[in-house]
Amino acid sequence: MKKVMLCLAKKKAKREIRYTTEEDLPAILQMALEEGWISDLTEFQTFIELNPFSCFVYVEDGKVIGSIMTFQHSQSAWIGNFVVSRGRRGRGIGRELLTRAINCLEEKKKKQIFLNAACGAEGLYEKFGFKKVMPVNRWRGKAAKPVEKGMSFRRNIPDIFNFLKVDTSLWKDERFSLITQLSLTRCICSHYEPSGFLMYGKVGPVVIVGPWELENGDEKTAEKLFTSGLSELESRNEVLLDVPSVNKKAERILSKHNFEVVSSTLFMCRGRLPKINFDGIFSFATMGSMG
C-alpha cells in the first residue's frame, strides 16, 4: 500500500500561476494560433514589457497551458490573450487565471475592467461581475482604391499628443502607453480639422486597422482617413478591423468598400461604464483586446 501511495504522489502534477516571461511567449502564441487568433510575438512582448506584473501563465509540470494578460490605462484596464490549452479545459484553470488577473487590477485601483468575450463565453464573465455593453463586429475586406489627388492627409507623423487628446475625449480615460506604443509600430494617417487619426499595421498574415478615431465623428472625414490609409497597401492585402456595433457610420463606410462582417464578440465591462463616445470610435485598437 505504501508503494502505491508513493507512486500516486510522484504522479501528482505540479501546478502554479506565475508572471509571464518572454520564454513563455512561443507556447502562448501556439495556443492562440490553434484558436484561429490573429496574433504575433510582438503583441505579446508589448503586453509583458508595459505590464510586467499583471500578465500571468498557468503552468503544469513546467509546461504553459494557460495565459491571461492585462493592459492598464490611467483609470481602466483591459483583459486579453486569455486562453487555456485544448484538452486542459473544464478543470477550472480559466477561472483561476481570471481571478488572479481581476485581483491584480483591483489592487491597482482600476475603476473599470474591459474585455471582448467570445460569443457563448459571456456566462463565465458575468459570474465575475462583467456586464454586456454591445457586440463588436469583425469586418474583413481588401485594401482600398487609390486615394484621389490633392488629399491633404499626413502620413507616418507620430503626433502622439494630438492622438492622445482625441482618444481621451472618446474613451474618457488617458491611454498614453497604448497610443504611444501603437504610434511607434503602426502606420498612421491623421487629420487635424476635425481631429482624427487611423493606425494600421501587419499582424501575422493580415493588416489590422485600429484605432480609427475621430473627435466629432464626422463620417466623410472618417472615410477619407480610411481610404487614405488603405490605398498605401497592395490590393491583395487582407484587412481586418473590430468595430463597435453602435457606430453605424463605420458600418456604412465599410459596406461601401465591400467589407463584410465575418465574426462578432461581446464588449463587456466590470465596474461602472463611463460615457464613452462610441460615435467617434470607428475601430478598436484590436491588439489583444486592449480597445
Image (spheres, rainbow, N blue to C red):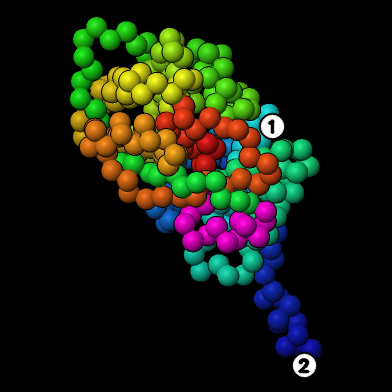
Give the residue type that dot 1 points to: Gln
In the rendered image, residue 49, in percent from the top left (x then y), is placed at 61, 33
Q: Which residue appears at 74% of the width and 49% of the height?
A: 103
In the displayed structure, does residue 193 sit left or right of residue 206? right
Residue 111 falls in image quadrant: top right
Viewer can see residue 238: no
Q: Which residue appears at 51% of the width and 41% of the height?
A: 288
In the displayed structure, does residue 184 sit left or right of residue 74? left
In the rendered image, residue 170, in percent from the top left (x then y), is placed at 55, 26
Residue lying furthest bottom in this view? 1
Crowding near the residue tagged with mark 2, few <14, some 14–19, many ≥20 C-alpha atoms within 10 Å: few
The answer to whether 289 is drawn above or below residue 202 in the figure is: below
Give the residue type that dot 2 points to: Met
In the rendered image, residue 90, in percent from the top left (x then y), is placed at 58, 70
Q: Which residue appears at 59% of the width and 23% of the height?
A: 168
Residue 209 falls in image quadrant: top left
Circle 2 residue = 1
Q: Quadrant of the N terminus?
A: bottom right
Viewer can see residue 114: yes
Span highlighted in magenta in the image:
116-129
Gap between marks 1 and 2 measured at Cα: 57 Å
Tag in front: 1 or 2: 1
Circle 1 residue = 75
- Residue 120 among magenta residues: yes
- Mark 1 or mark 2: which comes first in sequence? 2
**Mark 1 in CB contact with mark 2 (< 8 angstroms):** no
Q: Which residue appears at 56% of the width and 50% of the height?
A: 132
The answer to which of 170 and 142 lies nearer the viewer is: 170
